[in-house]
Image (tube, grey):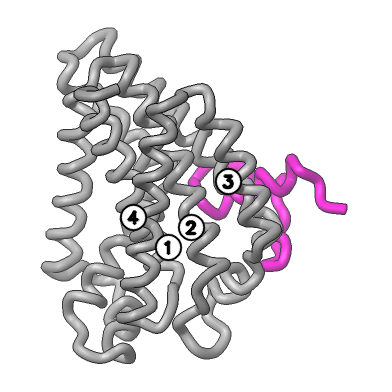
Amino acid sequence: MNNPLRLFATAATFLTRLPLARWSYAEPAHLAAAAPYFVPVGALVAAIAAVAAWLSLQWLPPALAPWAALVAAVITTGGFHEDGLADTADGLGGGFTRERKLEIMRDSRIGSYAGLALAAVLGGKYLALASLAPTQLFAALWLGHVLARWSVLPLAAWLPYAREGQAANKPVADGIGLTQVAAGSLFALLLVAPFGRLALVAAAASLIVALLAGAYFRTQLGGITGDTLGAANQVVELTCYLACAGAQRWI
């Protein structure tokens, strides 16, 4: 029987730079089993980002708090999801065939599409968070990181892996099914429910954007890759921040 703490450490080791590898499982099958724990790992990243924002508010101008939160999250994850966004943007923007798009996505170099995507998404995150009062900022960070990690689960269960052969992330993506989606959804529900209507708005927006992203990936690539899941993560996180910013007007 899998140990829940070791599964959490496995998910955290995969998604972050936190030094938990000694307590994690190493086999791909265990990583697929750990997929529901992507959601509480998102909560941990959110907590780290919130602490960075709070510390910034104590000594620096308020406008720097969102920047501190974003930097803390990137350092914690090693830019894991941002890298997926960059590769996906270059592939989808620079390729004309499915094969060429997947080939470009393997290239570690950053092209113009990647730079534009990173600027748009990171800039949008900052502006959305900067429009919020401190308490709302903390809520947005929590919802954004939790729901962004949750969003990859239904996409991985719904869509086939686009690359042929034994790609590094294929066993993990193929191992995520309805059981992992249900468990991850339960984690997400428990973690966001305290935020009431704001959580409902953010979750609805996240689901819509995740489904649209999945449909687009299917059309362009025939399915998902690790990079496209990272891109979906980033777009959903941005969507949550925008939803929280927009909700100020009518919640």
Q: Is residue 91 left or right of residue 34?
A: left
Which residue is denoted by mark 2 in the rendering? Answer: 152
The Cα–Cα distance between marks 4 and 1, rounded to whole angstroms, is 13 Å
Above or below 200: residue 236: below
Q: Is residue 210 left or right of residue 157?
A: left
The foreground one among 38 and 205 is: 205
Disc on the earlier residue, 1 or 2? 2
- Percent across and percent down for residue 227 are 39, 67
Which residue is denoted by mark 1 in the rendering? Answer: 229
What kind of element bears circle 2?
helix
Q: Are marks 2 and 3 in contact (CB under 8 Å)?
A: no
- Percent across and percent down for residue 18 are 53, 41
Q: Magenta segment, which residues?
A: 1-30
Looking at the image, which residue is at 70% across and 58% down? Answer: 179
Looking at the image, which residue is at 16% across and 70% down? Answer: 111
Between circles 2 and 3, the one closer to the viewer is 2
The Cα–Cα distance between marks 2 and 3, rounded to whole angstroms, is 15 Å
Q: Are marks 1 and 2 in contact (CB under 8 Å)?
A: yes
Residue 108 figure quarter: bottom left
Assess whether residue 77 is covered by the magenta stretch: no
Which residue is denoted by mark 3 in the rendering? Answer: 12
Which residue is denoted by mark 4 in the rendering? Answer: 209
What kind of element bears circle 1?
helix
